Image (spheres, helix red, strand yellow):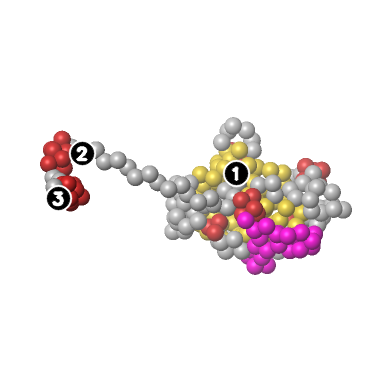
């Protein structure tokens, strides 16, 4: 797993993101593989889903964020591998840098491939096989995301995948993206934006920022549906005079 692409895109003299210089075969002393999800407000708001594998973080950008609804398919674009240390990265990527914007750790925890065991190395072998096939199934144990999921390659290219929730006890219609607080620092993207605006000496425009972050617009009012009267009902309705019509006749006399 190479971090060459990751390093080429970043100037570590200007950004506080981990450089990945100390590539480790899982610094974690845990037996489990870890996952992390970072909410990232760059040119567009999205969620970076990352799975630990062979000492790095395999990464997918999920524009609409993960869903617990099995009927929902979320587009997940595979991006370059990230260093293992990136799992805890939060803060502001300065303007002019790749991915400039605000980052929080939206969720984290452990994962195990479907068919896996408590043997970490064996689980990594299973994951690599599934990645090659383009059909990755795993169970998450996070603060927000729990249960079985799948990442399925769309075969359009190597980078286009779908993230799908399996039907299990954790499946739900709940919109998890409304839970917008970091699981590490309790910060939000908005609180980081306010802090950045204060540091730069500019006014924070909450309304315009909501629009940039994909804030929901007020839904257009639904037009009432026209009901078609059946022939019999139509005759009855025309035979009956309304109260308004009766009162008009009385006044005209």
User: Where residue 36 appears, x then y in whole percent?
Assistant: 64, 57
Decide which of tag 3 and tag 1 comes sooner along the chain: 1
Q: Give the secondary structure at mark 1.
A: strand
Decide which of tag 1 and tag 2 comes sooner along the chain: 1
Residue sticking out furthest to the right? 13
Residue indicated by mark 1: 76
Mark number for residue 250? 3
Residue at image position (68%, 67%) is 185
Decide which of tag 3 and tag 2 comes sooner along the chain: 2
Region of the chain picked out in magenta, as a range? 182-207
- Nearest to the eye among marks 3 and 2: give it: 3
Please indicate, yes or no, whether residue 175 appears anywhere in the rendered image: yes
Q: CA separation, marks 3 and 1? A: 71 Å
Q: Residues within 10 Å of mark 1 (few under 14, many from 20)?
A: many
- Nearest to the eye among marks 1 and 2: give it: 2
Residue at image position (81%, 57%) is 16
Residue at image position (65%, 54%) is 209
Q: CA separation, marks 1 and 2? A: 48 Å
| Residue 154, quarter of picture | top right
Q: Give the secondary structure at mark 3.
A: helix
Residue indicated by mark 2: 229
Q: Nearer the viewer, residue 252 or 198?
A: 252
């Amino acid at each position: 797993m190479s971090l060459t692409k990751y390093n080429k895109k970043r100037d570590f003299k200007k950004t506080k993101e981990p450089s990945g210089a100390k590539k480790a075969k899982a610094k974690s002393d845990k037996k489990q593989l870890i996952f992390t999800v970072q909410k990232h407000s760059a040119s567009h708001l999205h969620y970076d889903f990352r799975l630990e594998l062979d000492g790095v973080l395999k990464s997918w950008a999920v524009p609409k964020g993960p869903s617990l609804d099995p009927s929902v398919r979320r587009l997940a674009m595979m991006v370059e591998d990230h260093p293992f240390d990136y799992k805890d990265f939060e803060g502001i990527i300065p303007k002019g840098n790749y991915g400039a914007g605000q980052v929080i750790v939206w969720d984290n925890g452990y994962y195990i491939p479907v068919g896996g065991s408590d043997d970490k190395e064996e689980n990594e072998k299973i994951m690599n096989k599934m990645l090659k096939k383009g059909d990755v199934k795993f169970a998450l144990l996070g603060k927000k995301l729990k249960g079985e999921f799948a990442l399925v390659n769309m075969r359009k290219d190597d980078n286009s995948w779908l993230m799908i929730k399996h039907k299990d006890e954790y499946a739900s219609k709940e919109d998890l993206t409304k839970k917008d607080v970091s699981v590490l620092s309790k910060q939000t993207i908005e609180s980081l934006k306010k802090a950045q605006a204060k540091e730069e000496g500019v006014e924070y425009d909450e309304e315009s920022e909501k629009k940039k972050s994909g804030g929901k617009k007020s839904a257009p009012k639904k037009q009432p549906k026209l009901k078609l009267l059946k022939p019999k009902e139509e005759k009855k309705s025309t035979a009956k005079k309304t109260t308004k019509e009766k009162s008009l006749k009385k006044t005209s006399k």
